[in-house]
C-alpha cells in the first residue's frame, strides 16, 4: 500500500483546501474507498477525513425539506422519524443493504459516490475496460452489467442504494468546492464516461457533496430490490417509485452507468397507482432496454422491480 | 485382556450425548491461534506474484527493483523463464520483506514478461475444447433394447458449475528453522503427518526433522492435503534468510488456485416399465476441474440398473486445478441422477417418493436403510400430505418438494494413539491428528473419558503436532473412525495397564477391578468403591502409558452409509429467486459418538449445499481466462437468511449402533443440491437443471429458454 497523508479538518472549508492538493481524496465511512485501496485500485496520496466536520452530519427539517448531512450514517438515517414516516423509499433502500457493518459505517455521501462494482473495474481493467479495441465487458461476462445506456463502451452499473429513492423524491445535493457552494439535482451528480480516464461523477476538482435535501412533498413512495441472496448482496435490479398528485417519478438502480430515470414508467403511473398501472409502468420502464450478450434476464427483473415498487407505494 | 468393543447402550457415560465442542470457548473468544495468527520474532512476510494470463510462457523476470527496496529481504523465483503457465494466478515469484506492506510493494515491483498463449476456460462448450479426452464407454446389459421397450422415457441435460473450496482460513503457513536440519511449520493443513513427509522430501531433510503444528484450522474441505508449492517456498525462504517466514494466500489466490470442484455437464436418457421400474439408463457427461480435466462422476449414482451405459469426457481447461472437494464427484453425480430420475417419475405420473421406493432394491445393500430413512424424512417433511404433482402451484410464488439419496464409505483411516494416565488422575491422549473444526479433539476426549469412566474434565487431548503418533489425513470422512478406534484401543489398553500397576498395591487381581462413573470398583465387593483420583495416586510418579491403533482388534468402525434429504422451496416465478423454506436430512453413520457434533456436521453440510445449489460458482473471463469473482462479493456464499429451517434426524439404535463408528464429513453435503433442484422443478413445473440455480438460470427455464 502506498503511504498517504491523513488529515481530519473540523470545517468543510478546510476540507476543500486540503482536497485541492494533487492526489487528495475525501474519506467518509470508508466502506468503498478502503477496499479500493487494499485492492490497489486506488492509491491516494492524501486522505481528508470528513467525519470530524460537525456540520456535515445529522438530519433535520428545514423550510426546503429534510436536509441530510453527507456524513450521516445509513443505519441511523434509516431510523429517522421523517424517513420512516414520509420517505419509506429511502428506508427500504437502506434496509436492502443488509449488512449491519456497512450500515454502521456507510455515509449518505459515500453511498451516492461509491464506485461501481463491475468486476473488470475492480480487477484493475478500468471503468471502461477495452480489449482488442472492443468493450471488454460487452464482449466478456456481463451478467451484472447495464441494460440501459449501454450503447457506448461503458456498461457498468451505478451501485448506489440511495440514488434511486432520492432522485425519485426529487432530492437535491449541496456541492461545496473551491468556487463556493452550488446546488444540483441528485441525478445531475452522474454521467457516463467515454473512457476509463473520465469520471462517472460530475463533481469538479476538490468538490464534495455536503448534504442532500428531500423536499417535503407528500408522496406515496417505495423501493423494491431483487437479489440472489437474501443477505448482503448487490441487487440484480432495484427501482424506486414516488407518486403524488403532481405526477410520478421512477428510477432504476443497478441498471445503467447512471441511476436510470424512466419517464415512460412515470407516465404510466401519472393517473395514479393501480395493479394495472403498476404492470404498465414495469412494461414501459423496460420498453427501450437493450440486453448485452449475457444479461437479458435483468430486463425482466427491472420490469418486475418497477412493478413491485409501484405496488408497494400504492 | 481388554475386549475391544464399544460400551452397550445402557452403559454409555458420554457416547451419543449432546456434548459441545471443547474448543468452542477458545474459538469464540479469539484465544485459539490459527496458522495465520502465528507471529514469530524477526518474522518476514512473503507475498507471491501471480500470472495475469491463463496460458503463457514466461520470457523474462526482472526482480531488481524489488530487491532494491528497503525492507525486502529475499526475492525467490518460483517458476523461472521458459516455464509454461497453465492457469491465471499461478505463482511466479515470492517476495519476502520485513512487513506485509513492504512485501506487497516488492511484489508489485517485480516485472515479468510473458508470451501469451491461447487459453480455454469454457468447458461447457465441449466441442470447442482443444484437448477433450473421451473415455471408454461403460455398459451393462443392453440399454438400447431396454430403452426401446420402455413404457415411459425421459431425457434431459443437467449442469453443475465449477466451484471453489473458499476456506474461511486461506492456505498457508509460517516456517521457522531451529537449526540447519530442523524446521517447524505452523500450517493450515488437513494432514500434519503427510505434510511433514512431503516437505522433508522436497527440501532434502529427514521427514522426522519437519515439525508440523496445526492446533486449529479454518476449513479445508479436501483442499489442504498437500504441503503445496507455497509451503515449500516458505520453508526455503526461511532457510535462505535464517528468519521465520509467514506466507498465507490472499482471498483471490485462495479461490483462484487453492482448490476447485470440477464441473459436470451431462445428457441423460432414462426409461421405465409400466410399473415404474427403471429399466434403462444412458448418460454422457463431461466436465473440468482445470488442466487435468475431470474424472467421471459415478453415474448412475446410488442406483445400479440392469441396463445402463455411461461415457465421460474429461475437458482440460486453463483454470486453477481441482482438488478433492468434500465427497469428490458425488454431489455432481447426485444432481444428475436424482434430477433425471425425478424427471422419469414425472413422466411416469408418479410421486417421486413412491418412484424411489419402487426402485429402492436397485440401491443394493443399503436398501432397507433408505426405506427407513425415506419414511422418516416423509414424516418430518409432511411429504404425503403436502406433495403435489409438478407444476400444480398457482400464483407468483410457488412452493414444491424434492428429494435425493446419497451414499458414502467413511471407514476409519490408519491412526495411532498413546494414552498416558498420571497419578493426579489426569488421563491424556497423544495423537498426531488434526481438528479441522469438525470436533475431532472433542471426539478423542470423550472416547478417552468414556473408556476411563471419568468426566471430560479429567482428560486432556494433545494433538495437532506431527511428532505425535502418526494419524491419517483428515479427508473422505475417515477421521472419526480412525481416531476413535485408535483412542478406544489405546485407552482400553491403558486401563488394563493401570490395573496391572495398582492391583498389587491394592492387594487384589487386575481382573477384580473396573472403572465406572469416576470410581474404581472391586467386582467382588471386597473393598468399597474408590474415587478415580484417589486410585490414580497409586500409579506413582511414572505415568502409565499404552498405545492403540486403527485398524486393530475388534470391530469399532465400519464403512458405507446411506442418507436421504428433502427440500421444501419457494420460487418467485417473476424473478426466478429460489428460497429455501425447509430442509430435512435423515442420515445414518453407525454409532454416533457425539450427537451434537454429528448434527452440527449435517447442519453445516446443508448450508454448504444451499450455497452451491443457489449462488456459488467460479466465473472466468473469456478474454483473459482470469477468474472474475475471486472474492467474497461475487463468489457468493449463503448467509444465515438464505438457509431456511433445517431439520436433522440421525438414525441410531439397533441396526445402526452395532456397526461401530462411520465417518460423516462427506455424506450430508452430497444431496442438498439435488433435493433443492428437484423441489424447484416441482414448484415451477419446468425442469430446473443447472446449479447454481441463480435467478438468471431459473428465469431462463421458466421462460422456456433453457439451453
Image (cartoon, coloured by chain):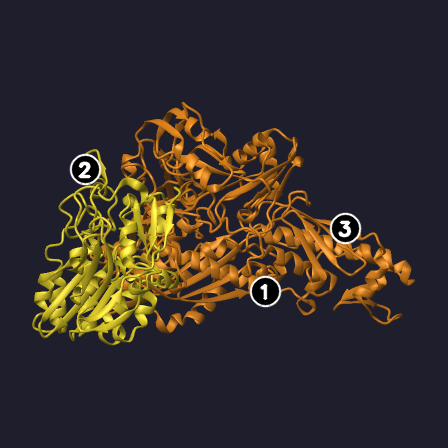
Q: Residue B591: x percent and y percent?
A: 60, 61
Q: Picture quarter containing residue B255?
A: top left
- Taking depth in this image into account, of B699 and B620 the one nearest to the observer is B620
Q: Nearer the viewer, mark 1 or mark 2?
A: 2
Q: Which one is closest to the eye, mark 2 or mark 3?
A: 2
Q: Is residue A45 left or right of residue A86?
A: right
Q: Quadrant of residue A97?
A: bottom left
For disc 3, the marked residue is B546
Of the numbered discs 3 and 1, the one sitting upstream in the chain is 1
> What label sits on residue B642 in the rendered view?
none
Corner quadrant of residue B677:
bottom left
Q: Nearer the viewer, mark 3 or mark 1?
A: 1
Q: Quadrant of the C terminus of chain A?
A: bottom left
Percent across and percent down for residue A34 are 36, 51
Q: Is residue A142 above or below residue B320?
A: below
The residue tagged 2 is A134
Mark 2, Cα crowd under 10 Å, few <14 / some 14-19 / many 20+, is few
SS for tag 3?
Answer: strand
Which residue is labeled 1 in the image? B20
In the rendered image of this protein, which colour is used for chain A? yellow
Q: Which chain is orange?
A: B
Q: Distance of mark 2 from mark 3, alpha carbons?
A: 71 Å
Mark 1 nearby-residue class (10 Å; few <14, some 14–19, many ≥20): some
Do callouts 1 and 2 point to residues on the same chain?
Answer: no
How far is disc 1 from disc 2 in space, using C-alphas? 57 Å
Q: Residue at x 56, y 54 (%)?
A: B663
Amino acid at each position: 500500500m502506498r503511504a498517504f497523508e491523513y488529515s481530519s479538518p473540523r470545517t468543510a472549508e478546510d476540507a476543500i483546501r486540503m482536497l485541492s492538493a494533487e492526489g487528495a481524496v475525501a474519506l467518509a465511512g470508508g466502506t468503498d474507498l478502503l477496499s479500493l485501496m487494499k485492492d490497489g485500485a486506488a492509491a491516494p496520496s492524501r486522505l481528508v477525513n470528513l467525519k470530524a466536520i460537525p456540520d456535515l452530519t445529522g438530519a433535520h427539517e428545514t423550510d426546503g425539506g429534510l436536509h441530510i448531512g453527507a456524513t450521516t450514517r445509513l443505519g441511523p438515517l434509516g431510523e429517522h422519524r421523517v424517513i420512516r414516516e414520509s420517505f419509506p423509499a429511502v428506508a427500504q433502500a437502506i434496509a436492502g443493504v443488509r449488512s449491519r457493518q456497512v450500515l454502521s459505517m456507510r455515509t449518505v455521501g459515500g453511498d451516492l459516490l461509491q464506485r461501481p462494482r463491475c468486476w473488470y473495474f475492480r480487477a484493475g481493467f478500468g471503468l471502461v475496460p477495452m480489449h482488442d479495441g472492443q468493450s471488454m465487458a460487452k464482449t466478456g461476462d456481463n451478467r451484472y452489467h447495464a441494460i440501459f445506456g449501454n450503447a457506448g463502451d461503458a456498461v457498468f452499473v451505478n451501485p448506489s442504494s440511495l440514488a434511486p429513492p432520492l432522485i425519485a423524491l426529487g432530492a437535491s445535493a449541496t456541492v461545496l468546492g473551491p468556487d463556493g457552494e452550488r446546488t444540483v439535482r441528485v441525478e445531475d451528480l452522474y454521467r457516463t464516461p467515454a473512457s476509463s480516464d473520465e469520471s462517472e461523477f460530475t463533481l469538479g476538482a476538490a468538490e464534495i457533496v455536503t448534504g442532500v435535501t428531500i423536499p417535503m412533498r407528500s408522496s406515496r413512495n417505495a423501493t423494491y430490490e431483487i437479489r440472489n441472496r437474501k443477505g448482503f448482496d448487490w441487487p440484480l435490479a432495484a427501482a424506486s417509485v414516488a407518486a403524488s398528485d403532481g405526477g410520478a417519478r421512477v428510477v432504476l438502480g443497478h441498471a445503467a452507468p447512471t441511476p436510470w430515470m424512466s419517464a415512460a414508467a412515470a407516465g404510466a403511473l401519472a393517473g395514479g397507482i393501480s395493479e394495472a398501472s403498476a404492470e404498465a409502468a414495469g412494461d414501459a420502464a423496460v420498453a427501450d432496454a437493450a440486453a448485452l450478450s449475457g444479461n437479458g434476464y435483468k430486463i425482466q427483473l427491472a420490469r418486475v422491480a418497477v412493478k413491485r415498487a409501484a405496488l408497494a407505494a400504492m | 485382556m481388554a475386549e475391544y468393543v464399544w460400551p452397550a447402550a445402557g452403559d454409555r457415560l458420554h457416547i451419543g450425548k449432546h456434548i459441545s465442542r471443547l474448543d468452542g470457548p477458545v474459538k469464540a473468544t479469539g484465544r485459539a491461534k490459527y496458522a495465520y495468527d502465528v507471529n514469530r520474532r524477526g518474522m518476514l512476510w512473503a507475498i507471491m506474484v501471480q500470472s495475469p494470463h491463463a496460458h503463457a510462457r514466461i520470457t523474462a523476470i526482472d526482480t531488481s527493483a524489488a530487491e532494491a527496496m528497503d525492507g525486502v529481504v529475499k526475492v525467490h523465483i518460483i517458476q523461472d523463464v521458459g516455464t509454461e503457465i497453465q492457469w491465471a494466478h499461478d505463482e511466479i515469484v515470492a517476495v519476502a520483506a520485513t512487513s506485509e506492506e513492504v512485501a506487497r510493494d516488492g511484489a508489485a515491483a517485480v516485472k515479468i514478461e510473458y508470451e501469451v498463449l491461447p487459453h480455454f476456460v469454457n468447458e461447457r462448450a465441449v466441442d470447442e475444447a482443444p484437448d477433450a479426452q473421451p473415455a471408454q464407454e461403460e455398459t451393462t446389459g443392453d440399454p438400447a433394447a431396454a430403452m426401446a421397450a420402455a413404457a415411459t422415457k425421459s431425457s434431459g441435460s443437467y449442469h453443475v458449475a465449477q466451484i471453489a473450496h473458499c476456506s474461511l482460513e486461506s492456505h498457508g503457513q509460517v516456517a521457522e528453522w531451529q537449526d540447519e536440519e530442523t524446521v517447524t511449520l505452523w500450517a493450515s493443513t488437513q494432514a500434519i503427518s503427510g505434510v511433514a513427509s512431503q516437505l522433508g522430501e522436497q527440501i532434502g531433510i529427514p521427514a522426522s526433522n519437519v515439525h508440523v503444528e496445526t492446533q486449529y484450522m479454518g476449513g479445508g474441505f479436501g483442499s489442504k492435503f498437500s504441503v503445496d508449492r507455497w509451503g515449500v517456498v516458505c520453508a526455503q525462504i526461511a532457510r535462505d534468510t535464517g528468519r521465520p517466514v509467514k506466507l498465507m494466500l490472499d482471498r483471490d489466490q485462495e479461490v483462484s488456485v487453492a482448490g476447485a470442484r470440477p464441473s459436470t455437464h451431462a445428457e441423460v436418457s432414462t426409461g421405465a416399465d409400466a410399473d415404474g421400474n427403471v429399466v434403462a439408463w444412458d448418460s454422457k457427461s463431461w466436465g473440468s476441474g482445470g488442466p487435468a480435466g475431470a474424472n467421471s462422476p459415478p453415474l448412475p449414482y446410488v442406483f445400479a440398473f440392469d441396463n445402463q451405459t455411461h461415457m465421460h469426457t474429461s475437458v482440460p481447461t486453463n483454470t486453477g486445478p481441482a482438488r478433492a472437494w468434500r465427497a469428490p464427484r458425488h454431489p455432481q453425480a447426485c444432481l444428475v441422477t436424482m434430477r433425471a430420475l425425478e424427471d422419469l417419475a414425472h413422466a411416469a405420473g408418479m410421486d417421486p417418493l413412491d418412484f424411489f421406493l419402487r426402485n429402492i432394491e436397485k440401491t443394493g445393500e443399503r436398501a432397507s436403510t433408505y426405506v427407513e430413512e425415506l419414511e422418516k424424512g416423509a414424516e418430518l417433511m409432511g411429504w404425503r400430505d403436502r406433495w403435489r404433482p409438478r407444476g400444480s402451484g398457482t400464483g407468483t410464488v410457488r412452493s414444491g418438494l424434492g428429494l435425493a439419496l446419497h451414499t458414502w464409505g467413511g471407514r476409519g483411516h490408519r491412526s495411532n494413539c498413546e494414552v498416558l494416565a498420571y497419578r493426579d488422575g489426569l488421563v491424556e491422549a497423544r495423537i498426531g491428528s488434526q481438528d479441522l473444526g469438525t470436533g475431532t479433539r472433542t471426539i478423542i476426549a470423550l472416547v478417552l473419558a468414556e473408556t476411563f469412566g471419568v468426566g471430560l474434565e479429567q482428560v486432556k487431548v494433545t494433538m495437532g503436532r506431527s511428532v505425535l503418533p502418526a494419524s491419517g489425513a483428515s479427508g473422505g470422512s475417515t477421521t472419526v473412525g480412525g481416531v476413535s478406534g485408535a483412542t478406544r484401543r489405546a485407552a482400553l489398553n491403558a486401563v488394563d495397564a493401570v490395573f496391572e500397576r495398582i492391583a498389587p498395591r491394592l492387594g487384589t487381581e487386575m481382573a477384580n477391578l473396573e472403572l465406572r462413573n469416576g470410581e474404581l470398583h472391586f467386582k467382588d465387593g471386597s473393598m468399597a468403591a474408590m474415587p478415580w483420583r484417589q486410585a490414580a495416586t497409586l500409579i506413582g510418579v511414572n505415568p502409565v502409558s499404552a498405545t492403540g491403533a486403527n485398524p486393530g482388534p475388534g470391530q469399532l468402525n465400519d464403512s458405507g452409509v446411506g442418507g436421504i434429504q428433502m427440500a421444501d422451496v419457494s420460487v418467485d416465478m417473476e424473478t426466478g429467486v429460489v428460497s429455501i423454506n425447509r430442509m430435512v436430512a435423515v442420515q445414518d453413520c453407525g454409532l454416533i459418538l457425539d450427537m451434537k457434533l454429528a448434527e452440527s456436521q449435517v447442519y453445516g453440510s446443508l448450508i454448504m449445499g444451499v450455497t452451491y445449489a443457489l449462488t456459488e460458482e467460479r466465473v472466468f473471463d473469456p478474454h483473459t481466462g482470469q477468474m472474475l469473482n475471486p472474492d467474497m462479493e461475487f463468489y457468493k456464499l449463503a448467509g444465515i437468511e438464505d438457509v431456511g429451517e433445517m431439520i436433522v434426524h440421525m438414525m441410531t439404535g439397533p441396526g445402526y449402533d452395532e456397526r461401530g463408528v462411520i465417518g460423516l464429513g462427506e455424506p450430508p453435503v452430497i444431496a442438498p443440491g439435488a433435493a433443492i433442484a428437484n423441489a424447484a422443478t416441482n414448484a415451477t413445473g419446468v425442469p430446473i437443471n443447472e446449479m447454481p440455480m441463480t435467478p438468471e438460470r431459473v428465469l431462463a427455464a421458466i421462460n422456456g429458454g433453457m439451453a
